[in-house]
Amino acid sequence: MTQTIDHAGSAGTSPGAEPAKGGSLLVLYLSLGGLAFAVLQSLVAPALSTIGRELNADTSDASWVITAYLLSASVLTPILGRLGDMAGKRKVLIGVLAALAAGTALAALAPNLAVLIVARALQGAAGAILPLSIGMVRDELPREKVATTVGLLSAIFGVGAGVGIVAAGPIVEHLSWHWLFWLPLVLVVIALAGAIFGMKESPVRTPGRLDIAGTVILSVSLVSLLLAISKGQAWGWGDAKTVGLLALGVVTLATFVFVELKVREPLVDMRLMKIRGVWATDLVALILGFAMFGTFLLVPTLLQLPAVTGYGFGKSVSQSGLFLLPTVIMMVLFGPIAGILTKKYGPKLPMFLGAVFVVAAFTLPAIAHGQIWQVLVSGILTGAGIGFAFAAMSNAIIESVPPTQTGEATSVNTIARTIGSSIGTAVVAAVITSHSTPQGLPTDDAFTYGFWACAGVAVLAIVAALILPSARRRHEEAVAHGVTDVPEEPAELHLPHRS
């Protein structure tokens, strides 16, 4: 594969080089853009019933506000990530932030549900912010700063999702649902101005053409799978539409893999999926995406149930959101810590610790969730685990692939996280619905089974983290695949692992 790169063979400047001018501002602008996107992803969910009521839409129709966002993000993230590798990450990032700004402004002004759905689809295009940002950090910052910075950026995506859940209630209660979009728009505009006036273009390129056939096939596959997962509960899992879309999604996904192995310039180089550090990390992303959005659904629902049920806590939407603040704070703290650990030991350790924390976070309330401290401790463990693991995932990807393929590899990881989130939301919603009283209130068993489901799935993340190659093996695999910015003698921490 042809590549154009100023610092030949390295991802970021050499350790002795001067840091890129304005590196701190670069990280600030990228952080603001990523935070705004992540907040917008989750901010709407707690306010969905309010939005539907004010726009005269039922719950099923209003849910398209979330579905359109997920579909757009999943389809466009790999395409825009690949374009960033080809045409320049800054150029594509400016386009993505402009689309996010336009979509957010349109959503704030939306007079009806149809316009709001279109606006949300525009916002979803910004799903490429994370892979583009990670690519720019890898290209522009000194090598010794990359792991920590990537850890921070990755953690911000988890933080943004938590902030969205926390802030939605107070915003809707004290302002209106339109302010769910006006407030994040400020962050988007600052990030866009920073990208235009405060960033220089990345020197790393992968010249080529966009794989149109692969783009179309992958789009059909992702739309089919996510639509079936998102709407399966409403349509019925045995409904012809649900089954048909799932079948179409699986068949087209298999077709996509076959096509990508044959074309000269694939949208996603399937050879990357043979690298253990890549596919194991994508598996962790899928699993923890499930777990993270499982807690964002289970905990607020439990907190808001009337206390007379004997297991609910009778909190308002605003109050229940505040109980997720410890989760958000832990994500902020543990993301950079994961970057430091990655720099010293490699990404395997923080990813393993993150998965362990997440398992503990769901096991505790699965055993007992009748006291508020149990919910709070669960949230703290969830935040620490997600902060650790999300930061480590991005670093594991960039240490496993060449600089010119950072965009496409991190895009696939982002898609895995999105699909995991969709599956987690659907599964937990199905558990709650199937264990409800005749009046529609979830039973105590609904939460027990929901927490156990998330804990059981998270155990698979521990297994996937252990599959990651050791530091020495990771270096050997990276060099074999053209990655030259992995330290030759990384510190080794001996964890159980599979060779």
Image (cartoon, rainbow, N blue to C red):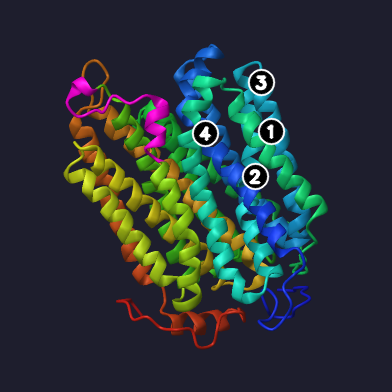
| Disc nearer the start of the sequence (2/1) | 1
**Disc 3 versus disc 1: distance between alpha carbons?**
10 Å
- Closer to the chain start, of discs 3 and 1, is 1
Bounds of the magenta segment: 307-324
Inter-mark Cα distance, 4 to 3: 16 Å
Instruction: Please say whether residue 126 is one of the residues in the magenta stretch.
Output: no
Q: Within 10 Å of the Cα at label 2, are there few (<14), some (14-19), or many (20+) other Cα atoms?
A: many
- In this rendering, is residue 260 above or below 230? below
Mark 4, Cα crowd under 10 Å, few <14 / some 14-19 / many 20+, is: many
Residue type (three-letter) at the residue carrying disc 3 = Ala
Find residue 309 and report its horizontal and vertical position in percent. 19, 22
Kind of residue at disc 2 = Ala
Q: Which residue is mark 2?
A: 126
Determine contact: label 2, label 1, CB under 8 Å. yes
Q: Which mark is residue 103?
A: 1
Q: Is residue 483 visible?
A: yes
Q: Is residue 55 above or below residue 28?
A: above
The amino acid type of the residue labelled 4 equals: Leu
Q: Nearer the viewer, mark 2 or mark 4?
A: 4
